[in-house]
Image (cartoon, rainbow, N blue to C red):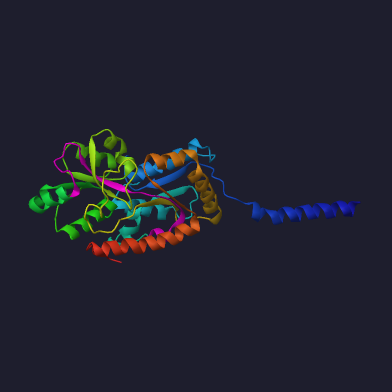
Amino acid sequence: MMLQRFALAAAGLIAAIGATPASAQFNPTKPIEIVVHNGPGSGPDIFGRTVAQTIEQEKLAPVRFQVSNKVGGGGVTAANYMVGRRGDSHVLGAFTSVWMTNPMVQQAASTKVVDMTPISRLVVEPAVIVVRADSPFKTLRDVMNAALKEGSKIRQAGGSPLARDALVRQLLMAESGAKWAFVSFPSGGERIAAVLGGHVDFVLLEPPEAGELIRAGKLRAVVQIAEKRLPGFENVPTLPEAGFKVPNVPQARGIIGPPDMPADAVAYYEDLLSKMARSATWQKFLQTNQLDDAYLNAKATTAFLGDYEKQLRAILVQSGVKLVR
């Protein structure tokens, strides 16, 4: 009997030891930080806060998700911060195209998104170029014609010189021969205030940044940066429809981890974001803001980022931007 009890106890111990690695899974033990590279009110900030709010509203995680604005260097500060948190399972980053283009043109921006830990692509954003509702410019061609005559007197509000609004500017200038001023603002709220106040002539915005103002009649869209016309903007032409032969500049948003994030943490966030992407709260956000549902898991996101980097590199070359790597 004693030997039998010893054998059963030993078998149970061996089974428990053998089960430990397989059952060891990451679970967050403190608030999760979501790093964004722009200030409050900007597209990255809205995206990061919506991710955090959706996870909280849907009760998908045992801890809170909090946005951390790391502004500076057109995304360099945020990327360097992520590298400094190497292996940290409680830090995430909200990537956009500027995280991809920075290392191509800035010598100091040595951190590449593909060197971090891809977790999920979530959306692909269209955009609109808007003017104030009482602007004399009725079309984008009107803006280009004015820029051909007046040059730097025509001003565009924007963010980073490497963000999508600046890339579209470079492509349009190369295609039309027009030149105009580009005025950088750290947040989407400041860019909107600048165009509403008449301090700049136009601005490129993502739908979450300007939707209500367009519907309220304070801003007017003159062209769409999209593959097809958006619901609610059926009377606004796309760039090709407006006669501009420039490539569509994509804006993908998603979530990455710092370099060397443990595999069990990646699996946790991959599962979490998959549930979030299917939730009613997230789907309503996509529909309200005319965003394309573009969820990818970690493996597919890794492949996408490699292709995305090549696509953005080709756009930079076409627009005449000097590359450093």
Q: Quadrant of residue 134?
A: top left
Give left or right: position of 209 versus 30: left
In front: 323, or 129? 129
Give left or right: position of 45 versus 92: left
Q: Quadrant of residue 193?
A: top left
For the C terminus, the quadrant is bottom left
User: Whole-percent x and y of residue 188?
Assistant: 28, 42
Residue at the (72%, 52%) spot, across then down: 16
Does 5 sit above or below residue 280? below
Looking at the image, which residue sits at the far left?
149
Residue 113 part of the magenta-drawn span? yes
Looking at the image, which residue sits at the far bottom?
325
Asked if residue 65 shows in the view, the reply is no
Residue span colored magenta? 112-140
**Figure label count:** 0
Residue 50 part of the magenta-drawn span? no
Residue at the (10%, 47%) spot, across then down: 153
Asked if residue 20 shows in the view, the reply is yes
User: Whole-percent x and y of residue 234?
Assistant: 30, 43
User: Whole-percent x and y of residue 275?
Assistant: 52, 45
Give left or right: position of 277 versus 174: right
User: Whole-percent x and y of residue 172?
Assistant: 20, 56
Residue at the (53%, 51%) spot, across then down: 265
Looking at the image, which residue sits at the far top?
216
In front: 67, or 125? 125
